[in-house]
Image (cartoon, rainbow, N blue to C red):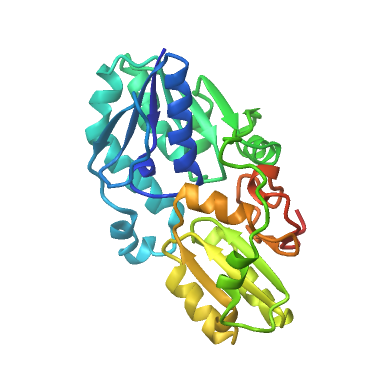
Amino acid sequence: MNVALYNLTTTTKIGGVEHFVWDLSRELVSRDHQVTIIGGVGTHREPAPGVRVLTFPFVSRRFWQSFPLLRRAYAEAKLLERLTLAIPALPELVRGGYDVAHIQKPYDLAPTLLARRMGGPRVVLGCHGEDFYGGDRLLSRCVDAAVSCSHFNARTVAARYGFEPRVIFNGFDPTLFRPLPPDPSWRQSHESHERNIRHCLLSVGRLMPWKGIDVAIRALADLPRAALLVAGDGEERPRLERLAAATGVAGRVRFLGVLPRGCFHRSTARLTCCWQRALPARPSESVWSRPRPADCRWLPLASEASQR
């Protein structure tokens, strides 16, 4: 089968959906499928032998958000960003000989469905969150199949679109995510700036508004002997740093930035068992506060309370 994995940010950003696409591409190639990743012009690449990568220009959401009416219209800005990618990518979708175009966001429904109408591939919608916008309900009825990474997300999508995607859980590489002996020296190196720390929270993910890292930072005010390690980077980092300073907990928050995958799994696997994984993500996240064992590395959890 000839598969197009169509997602703008696969080649421009580092994040969960992006890692998923690269992992999926490798697994499909290992099963003798032809795979092409179609993304936006950018520098992010992951090792994927046998996978063809095509990139096309686009107009960043930041440009669209510079207009007053779109400044807080996050979904609409992302939709416009994706539509500008579709203009140069559409001929490839139509004439590339693909059997399936697998998209990861509803923003890409219109161009892939148009490509199918023009003789292109069938469309599979992958659901990783909400990302809803005006008109998406009508477009969603036309997809050939839909899959979701969690039952929570599948129910959210069903409430919006009127059908429930098939749940296929994200896999993980057991050669990377496996128990390792605790390494106290790693802990000490990350808490040397505060001597009275007894509990440390670890939050992992791209720093975006819906990840809820601000909730974890504010919680430190009620946890005087706790510290927070934040692994990941993103556009919210400056605001989160200011928030930590304003709430008086800057000395107990450490931003680690982007950690390479190999470094990250070794680091989290060596955390001592008295540490905790913080999961403050808001309900719009695809798995919300229900972690996978491979994610949390068998650590105790601290999660935001919610009515949902």
Answer whether residue 135 is visible to the viewer in this image. Answer: no
Q: Position of residue 144 (x, y in %)?
A: 51, 19
From this view, report whether residue 290 is shown above or below residue 251.
above
Quadrant of the rendering where the N terminus is positioned: top left
Asked whether, in this view, residue 58 is left or right of residue 163, the answer is left
Q: Which one is in front, 46 or 129?
A: 46
Q: Position of residue 277 (x, y in %)?
A: 68, 59
**Residue at position x 30%, y 64% in the image:** 66
Q: Position of residue 198 (x, y in %)?
A: 73, 76
Q: Position of residue 103 (x, y in %)?
A: 44, 32
**Residue at position x 56%, y 58% in the image:** 210
Asked whether, in this view, residue 53 is left or right of residue 267, the answer is left
Query: For residue 101, which quarter of the picture?
Result: top left
**Residue at position x 25%, y 24% in the image:** 92
Q: Which one is in front, 47 or 25?
A: 47
Asked whether, in this view, residue 190 is left or right of residue 299, the answer is left
**Residue at position x 28%, y 59% in the image:** 63
Query: For residue 3, which quarter of the picture?
Result: top left
Answer whether residue 274 is visible to the viewer in this image. Answer: yes
